[in-house]
Amino acid sequence: MRFRLFAGLVLTVASGVLPAQEDEVTVQSTEVVPGLYMLDGADGQFAGGNMGLLVGPDGVVLIDDGLTTISASLLAAIADISGEPVDFLINTHVHADHTGSNAALHTHGATIIAHDNIRKRLLQLTGDEAVAAAALPQITFSDTTTFHLNGHTAHVFHVQNAHTDGDAVIHFTDLNVIHSGDVFFNKLFPFIDFNSGGSVQGYLAAQDKIIAIANDDTIIIPGHGALATKADLVLARNMLADSYARVKKLVNAGLSEDEIVARNPLADYDDGWSWVFISAESMTRSLAKSLMHQVTSD
Ligand SMILES: [Zn+2]
């Protein structure tokens, strides 16, 4: 089946990998610390990016909202946990697997907060990618914003040109929990959206920034993959830096993209990091393209 996961990137995945009926995805919750949950697809079903949910007497805050097709299941899961609708929805970036349920959440009362560039990019979508007015953030920020709710502080900060040009990281400072959005894929090759302002240097810088504010007890909700620790993030950061250096060496030696792929420079990372959406080969091609400045608009 053809499946649009990220804006500008249509991926073909084997049938059976994703449920035949996407609207049957069930959203499950995992308590990260008291009052803060991670939401994702039950039984390995793909619901989109990992979501975060803060509940308490002052209000309900949701971070990201998965694919459009999970809206009903997501609202049901939130009602189960909080008994109250979402007051504030934070988008970590523009991709449809993180903003797909924006309109549904806003229709149910949520105010959407996101980086300036997310609103800009959502407004640029046309055709069958165009989003309803209800899906647009009502409040945007350029650098940081901070939530003070339920006795907790959530520092939301922008990281420049990382996964996209509109990424935000959410740091629950007193709870020692970080939602990284897609600047961290745990034990999965990362997708860097060069066509939406992402860059390897920015991606690594964003990861370094998170590493700098984390300690050994920090729990990280990654954009994709299982709940993580600082050590997991360090592993991912070093893997990407090393992969980039390996491909760069071959680009500098004058090899073409296909010649680089034939050398299979990321072979030893294939086992631990390849997944249904990004193989060692596609990671190699992506890094080679970015180094050769051959990234096209599609
Ligand atoms: Zn993404």
Image (spheres, rainbow, N blue to C red):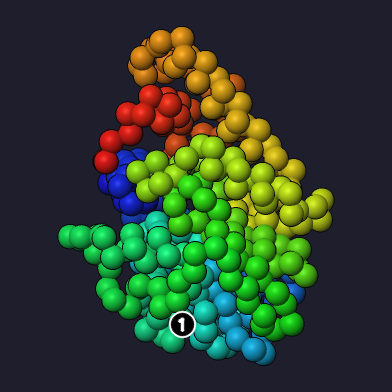
- The residue at the point 36 percent across, 29 percent down is 293
> For residue 278, which quarter of the picture?
top left
Please indicate, yes or no, whether residue 97 appears anywhere in the rendered image: no
- The residue at the point 52 percent across, 84 percent down is 87
Name above or below for residue 143 compared with residue 7: below
Q: Nearer the viewer, residue 107 or 29?
A: 107
Residue labelled with disc 1:
110
Q: Nearer the viewer, residue 67 or 41?
A: 67
Q: Is residue 296 left or right of residue 238?
A: left
- Mark 1 neighbour density, 10 Å: few (under 14) some (14–19) many (20 or more): many
The image position of residue 136, as x and y in percent, is: 35, 72
Name above or below for residue 5 compared with residue 176: above
Check the picture and name the quadrant holding the C terminus: top left
Amino acid carrying label 1: it is Ala
Q: Is residue 7 left or right of residue 261?
A: left
- The residue at the point 60 percent across, 56 percent down is 180
The image position of residue 67, as x and y in percent, is: 39, 63
- The residue at the point 63 percent across, 77 percent down is 147
Please indicate, yes or no, whether residue 88 appears anywhere in the rendered image: yes
Q: Nearer the viewer, residue 205 or 234?
A: 205
The image position of residue 86, as x and y in percent, is: 51, 82
SS for dot 1:
loop
Name above or below for residue 53 compared with residue 60: above
Q: Is residue 79 left or right of residue 216?
A: left
The image position of residue 164, as x and y in percent, is: 44, 50
Q: Is residue 27 left or right of residue 134?
A: right
Q: Farthest right residue? A: 216
- The residue at label 1 has a CB less than 8 Å from ligand 1: no
